[in-house]
């Protein structure tokens, strides 16, 4: 069962976190508060933080210089570099990078969390000092912290790539009051206020366009830089960039409820939903670490009973190598980072995953079920023909449009747009929406039924039988329980719909199904033109649920793609629910696991491909980490590998895994 958490727009945003011991505990280079235990939230761009970020590498650099100097002095056998002086130099170099690691190990032990990465590094490096291998002890800790720097840089880069797209909301907005312009914080603007946006400025709040026309760059919301032209009365979303002229908007959402804020919250909260691989590695590390510690103890002590020339320091050295190699750094860092990179790459492509677990689920999808209107078609209907039965056509249109004006359905909007202003003088009362059928209500002194054939049949209104053979979308009208005429409506298939279906087949999707409440004749026509495997029309919302349930009972992993409020139940039911985010309803978007921001059906295949590439990278890292560690562990146990090989097996492999994980950011989908 999926859990779709409701997003609270007013809740404070939490910084994204990579679930690993390093970032969770912040040894070494991360900034801490005065007590040394709490991370300063990213995004708090204070001067002090920037200075700390600039100087946080200084201890690492000094430690590296001291280590290299010490190795050089050892190599040339400088007379004075012996005894306490040599120990002091290496100890200072060690404490610069290892002090906080040891502190975290001690704190964790005090809390009852004994076996962790910090304990492994502490035992291994202090043990190296005990047997006189000072340089190797410093090197292990130094390269461990350098690995942290690389990991933090990778995380920062991934976070920055996401926030560069969506978290650059304006700090100031121009409020129009009594023909005066006042610059205020966007959080102070109320619904209904009017704001002004100059050319080149980013829209700070959602609103309806009051100016006749303007074009907008929508890349922050959709990943596409193609200009989108809006006309007076159309909705403009926060995050769009005004391209043409000075415009005015009437605000429809507060700052916290704007489209851009919701998108940012979705991405920020995505890391809290972990993939099964992440969950497994977290559980694995908790068992793995104590096993490694006890094996190292056994490797040190057991040979005493079986080896004739047993030397404690020699076997201790092998055990220390074993500990360094065994650190699960590459796994606990690179795997979450791989998923995080996948979420970031998806954001660049206008796709929002609400959790890394959905990246995994996308790889298992074998059946894609899609709604028609608004998903595969534009959802922008236009009236094609008006036929009346014994009435004046203008009066017929005015009555029909008056009732349809109470609906937000695309077909209703098309009728209203075609009727012009004629319906505005009509009095509409007692409106009732009958799901899957249409509308019933009173217009002036007449009772109207406006909807499909099922609506008229439900109220036992007879109409010509040949009407049922019309392929196009049709609106039937009855006035005072008498058939009054019909209006035909046409919708346009989206430009990339055919390519989207073809690409899904190429990716190995076995079955593509289209479910629609539209007439079955229209649905079959669209399905044939797009080469969709199965199509069903004339469905109520509960019928769509029944179809998806039947597919799941067959053992199929189902992804459902929809955009309307009536799609929310089936989006929640599917293994992975996808919503068209540009034109889709809030209910569908909040219920969905994945949101496609630009309404392009081709992005469905992109989302599946992203999931597969992310999964490949994660398993590459797992194979790399286990393969190299197993090899060097064997060599270390037999005394062949030194501490330097151990450093590569730990930090080197972690570094390679991190580079592999961030590779997805550069891929094109």
Image (tube, rainbow, N blue to C red):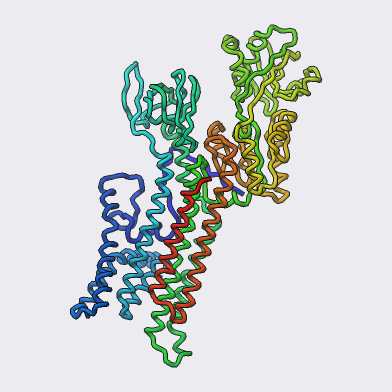
Q: Does residue 69 appear in the picture of this structure?
A: yes
**Image location (x, y in percent) of residue 175:** 35, 24
Q: How many marks?
A: 0
Q: Where on the picture, by quarter, is residue 434? A: top right
Nearer the observer, 645 or 421: 645
65 on left or right of 261 = left
Q: Residue at x 45, y 23 (%)?
A: 214
**Image location (x, y in percent) of residue 490:** 66, 23
Toward the right, the furthest residue is 465
Residue 564 to residue 91: above or below: above
Q: Residue at x 62, y 49 (%)?
A: 1
Toward the left, the furthest residue is 80
Nearer the observer, 488 or 569: 488
146 on left or right of 499 = left
Nearer the observer, 513 or 294: 513
Residue 247 to residue 348: above or below: above
Nearer the observer, 469 or 269: 469
Toward the bottom, the furthest residue is 308
Residue 543 to residue 648: above or below: above
**Image location (x, y in percent) of residue 619:** 54, 60
Residue 428 to residue 568: above or below: above
Toward the front, the furthest residue is 76
Q: Does residue 115 appear in the picture of this structure?
A: no
Q: Where on the picture, by quarter, is residue 201? A: top left
**Image location (x, y in percent) of residue 330:** 45, 63
Q: Residue at x 57, y 52 (%)?
A: 612
């Amino acid at each position: 069962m999926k859990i779709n958490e409701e997003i609270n727009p007013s809740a404070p945003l939490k910084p994204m976190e990579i679930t690993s011991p390093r970032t969770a505990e912040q040894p070494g280079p991360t900034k801490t508060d005065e007590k040394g235990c709490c991370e300063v939230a990213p995004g708090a761009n204070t001067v002090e933080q920037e200075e700390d970020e600039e100087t946080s590498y200084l201890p690492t650099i000094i430690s590296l210089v001291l280590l290299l100097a010490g190795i050089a002095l050892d190599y040339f056998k400088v007379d004075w570099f012996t005894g306490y002086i040599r120990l002091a130099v290496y100890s200072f170099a060690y404490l610069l990078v290892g002090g906080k690691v040891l502190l975290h190990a001690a704190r964790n032990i005090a809390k009852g969390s004994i076996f962790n990465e910090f304990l492994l590094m502490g035992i291994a490096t202090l043990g190296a000092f005990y047997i006189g291998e000072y340089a190797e002890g410093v090197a292990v800790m130094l390269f461990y912290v350098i690995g942290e720097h690389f990991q933090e840089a990778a995380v920062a880069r991934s976070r920055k790539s996401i926030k560069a797209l969506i978290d650059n909301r304006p700090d100031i907005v121009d409020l129009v009051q009594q023909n005066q312009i006042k610059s205020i914080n966007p959080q102070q603007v109320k619904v209904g206020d009017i704001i002004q946006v100059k050319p080149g400025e980013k829209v700070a709040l959602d609103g309806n366009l009051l100016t006749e026309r303007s074009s907008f760059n929508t890349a922050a919301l959709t990943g596409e830089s193609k200009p989108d032209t809006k006309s007076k009365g159309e909705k403009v979303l926060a995050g769009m960039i005004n391209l043409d002229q000075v415009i005015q908007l009437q605000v429809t959402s507060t700052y916290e409820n704007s489209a851009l804020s919701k998108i940012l919250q979705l991405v920020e909260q995505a890391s809290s939903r972990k993939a099964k691989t992440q969950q497994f590695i977290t559980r694995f590390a908790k068992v793995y670490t104590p096993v490694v510690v006890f094996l190292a103890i056994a490797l040190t002590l057991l040979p005493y009973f079986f080896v004739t020339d047993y030397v404690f320091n020699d076997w201790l050295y092998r055990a220390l190598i074993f500990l360094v190699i065994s650190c699960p750094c590459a796994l606990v860092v690179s795997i979450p980072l791989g998923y995080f990179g996948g979420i970031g790459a998806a954001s660049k492509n206008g796709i929002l995953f609400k959790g890394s677990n959905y990246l995994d689920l996308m790889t298992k999808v074998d059946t894609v079920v899609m709604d028609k209107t608004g998903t595969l078609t534009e959802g922008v209907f236009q009236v094609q023909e008006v036929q009346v039965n014994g009435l004046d056509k203008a009066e017929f249109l005015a009555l029909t449009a008056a009732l349809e004006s109470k609906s937000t359905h695309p077909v209703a909007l098309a009728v209203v747009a075609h009727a012009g202003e004629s319906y505005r003088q009509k009095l509409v009362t007692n409106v009732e929406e009958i799901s899957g059928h249409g509308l019933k209500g009173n217009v002036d002194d007449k009772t109207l039924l406006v909807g499909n054939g099922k609506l008229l049949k439900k109220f036992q209104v007879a109409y010509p039988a040949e009407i049922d053979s019309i392929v196009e979308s049709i609106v039937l009208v009855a006035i005072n329980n008498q058939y009054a005429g019909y209006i035909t409506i046409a919708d346009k298939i989206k430009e990339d719909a055919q390519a989207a279906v073809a690409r899904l087949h190429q990716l190995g999707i076995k079955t593509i199904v289209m479910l629609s409440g539209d007439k079955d004749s229209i649905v079959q026509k669209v399905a044939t033109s797009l080469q969709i495997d199965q199509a069903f029309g004339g469905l109520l919302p509960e019928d769509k649920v029944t179809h998806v349930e039947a597919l799941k009972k067959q053992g199929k992993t189902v992804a459902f793609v929809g955009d309307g409020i009536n799609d929310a139940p089936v989006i929640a039911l599917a293994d992975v629910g996808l919503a068209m985010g540009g034109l889709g309803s809030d209910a569908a978007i909040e219920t969905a696991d994945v949101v496609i921001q630009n309404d392009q059906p081709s992005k469905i295949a992109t989302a599946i491909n992203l999931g597969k590439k992310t999964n490949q990278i994660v398993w590459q890292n797992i194979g790399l980490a286990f393969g190299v560690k197993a090899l060097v562990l064997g060599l270390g146990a037999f005394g062949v590998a030194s501490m330097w090989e151990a450093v590569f097996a730990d930090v080197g492999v972690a570094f390679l895994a991190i580079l592999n994980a961030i590779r997805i950011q550069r891929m094109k989908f």
